[in-house]
Amino acid sequence: MNVKIRTILMNAMLTCIYAVLTFICAPFSYGAIQFRLAEILMFLAFYNRRFIPGLVIGCLLANAFSPMGIYDVIFGTSATLLTCLSFTRISHLWMGVCLGALFNGIIVGAELYFLLDLPFLLNAGYVFIGEVIVLMIGAGVFKVLEKNQVFMKIYMN
């Protein structure tokens, strides 16, 4: 299959998976305490930057249905974009956990502070902790997947 077509199809699939996982877990996906299982997919950007569009568009689509409205589309999606871009610059999965949690904690924490007048440090901490938990699970999953040659050949080349 043509590499460009394959990349477009894989990104479309990622967009759908990210958005659906976020919708399915909606009570935990939005608000002061977040636990987005879809964030596990972020590690695909660690291995291959060509997955960034699918992840960012999936987040944008999921955030379009957020109770925070356009603000979550802008700020939440920006946090995802920064996380994905940072993943392309690091060489250690566990550093990705820290960066992803930091970006999301600060950006989404600030969003909640300005929109809902909730305490910044408390909300940034809640978002940070939720993101750390999800990304630690994701890092563990991808550490296991690194050992699978078929997975690595299909998704990382």
Image (cartoon, grey):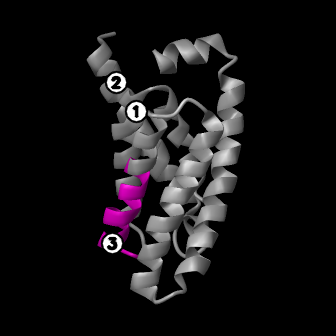
Which numbered tag is attached to residue 51?
1
Between discs 1 and 3, the one toward the N terminus: 1
Measured Cα–Cα span from mark 1 to mark 2: 8 Å
Q: How many marks?
A: 3
Mark in the foreground, 3 or 2: 3
Height in image: 133 above or below 10?
below
Q: Amino acid at mark 2?
A: Thr
The quarter in which the C terminus is drawn is top left
Q: Position of residue 10 (x, y in %)?
A: 40, 28
Q: Is 19 drawn above or below residue 141 in the view shown?
A: below
Which element type, helix, strand or loop, lies under badge 1?
Answer: helix
Tell me which residue sits at (30%, 71%) in the image.
Answer: 70
Which residue is the site of mark 2?
7
Q: From this view, report whether residue 122 is shown above or below residue 88.
A: below
Q: Secondary structure at mark 3?
A: helix
**Magenta segment range?**
67-81
Q: Earlier in the sequence, mark 1 or mark 2?
A: 2
Considering depth in this image, is 126 or 106 the residue closer to the camera?
A: 106
Residue under the image location 49 percent in, 19 percent down: 156
Between 156 and 17, the one nearer to me in the picture = 156
> The residue under label 3 is which amino acid type?
Tyr
Q: Which quadrant holds the N terminus?
A: top left
Please name the residue that numbered disc 3 is placed on.
71
